[in-house]
Amino acid sequence: MDGAQRAGLQLQQLLPTSSASSASETSFSYKENLIGALLAIFGHLVVSIALNLQKYCHIRLAGTKDPRAYFKTKTWWLGLFLMLLGELGVFASYAFAPLSLIVPLSAVSMIASAIIGVIFIKEKWRPKDFLRRYVLSFVGCGLAIVGTYLLVTFAPNSHEKMTAENITRHLVSWPFLLYTLVAIVLFCLLLYFYKEKSANSVLVILLLVALLGSMTVVTVKAVAGMLVLSIQGNLQLDYPIFYVMFVCMVATAIYQAAFLSQASQIYDSSLIASVGYILSTTVAITAGAVFYLDFIGEDVLHICMFALGCLIAFLGVFLITRNRKKAIPFEPYISMDAMPDEETEAWVTLLVSSRTRIPAQDCLAVDPELLLGWAAFPSVGAGFQWA
């Protein structure tokens, strides 16, 4: 009984109170939600455009005899500049809005990629064939837009200043410690099956990514919030917790990119985009609700409408990626009947086992943000080798 009382007291310390000090640290401003949402939407749109510009540059160079390297073209550098600008916008959005609102907004990148893919398609289609071919993408875009509207409208409205004291208090709270323990055990089990038992299921790999991504977005919000407070005059950079969070943010983002790179060599990018978005968003929202207590004090109607918005966005993203063509495997151009020796056979084997190539128009139509740490760093791990 005493243990339950102590746990209840610890949770009460994390909740907003009616005291003057708590009121000064906690704001319930829809304006901050709007600023954060607009920054996230802007960032995802710009990153999506940037990555497609860079892919378009690679495709043009691959289809011509231009001897220039890709980094010597203005288009590629423009894409890099826009990518950095978009990443900065997404990063800054975490300082203003709750994590549970910012994470699902990565669906905006799916919508932008679908539209950009249609714009860059060079083939001419009759209107009837065009609608039949892309009707799922159009419906998916509509659903994703409706889901995004519900997310922004019914998002949790809890705003706590990201001071070092608040972050440390959340970090050692029993709900987050319990979540961390469960996440570590599940991660170790999945990693064991993936490495030792060769369980290369897309769910196994993307669950590993999602668990890492949940820690990424938690640390991103802490780092972004502390940086904003420091810029406003309340210096937070002299606290060790800032650097702990920063190192965790970088490490988890790097490992996400590594796992996604492995997944991209086995599975189609459209499958990775849709399944990864659903899994990573769900786990990240859970982590945000546990660490930052995003939904404490929200009424049941708002929580249900927010969950409905997530489900609609999930369905929209699934439909957008559902209509993509599968990757066309690379076919050897050497006749298998005309191999004079073992050395030639070895070269043919190397050609056959090389990575698959994706048609140019599908490169532009497939979502470029195959990572959510996609939500935190949209462009991480998006560097696939396109045909």
Image (cartoon, rainbow, N blue to C red):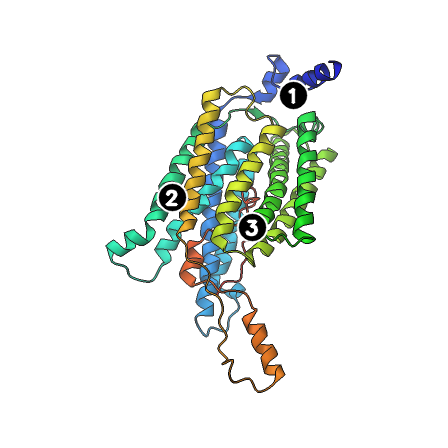
Left/right placement of residue 187 relative to residue 361 reads right
Secondary structure at numbered mark 1: helix
Residue 202's disc is 3
Name the amino acid type tagged 3: Val
The quadrant of the rendering that contains the N terminus is top right
Q: Are marks 3 and 1 in contact (CB under 8 Å)?
A: no
**Residue drawn where x is 48% and y is 77% of the image:** 333
Residue 123's disc is none
Q: Residues within 10 Å of mark 1 (few under 14, many from 20)?
A: some
- Of label 1 and label 2, which has the lower sequence position? 1
Image position, residue 78 (x, y; %): 48, 56
* Numbered-mark total: 3
Secondary structure at numbered mark 2: helix
- Foreground disc of the pair 3, 2: 3
- Of label 3 and label 1, which has the lower sequence position? 1
Residue 166 is at least partly visible in this image = no
Name the amino acid type tagged 2: Gly
Residue bearing mark 1: 14
Image position, residue 282 (x, y; %): 54, 37
Q: CA distance from mark 1 to mark 2?
A: 39 Å
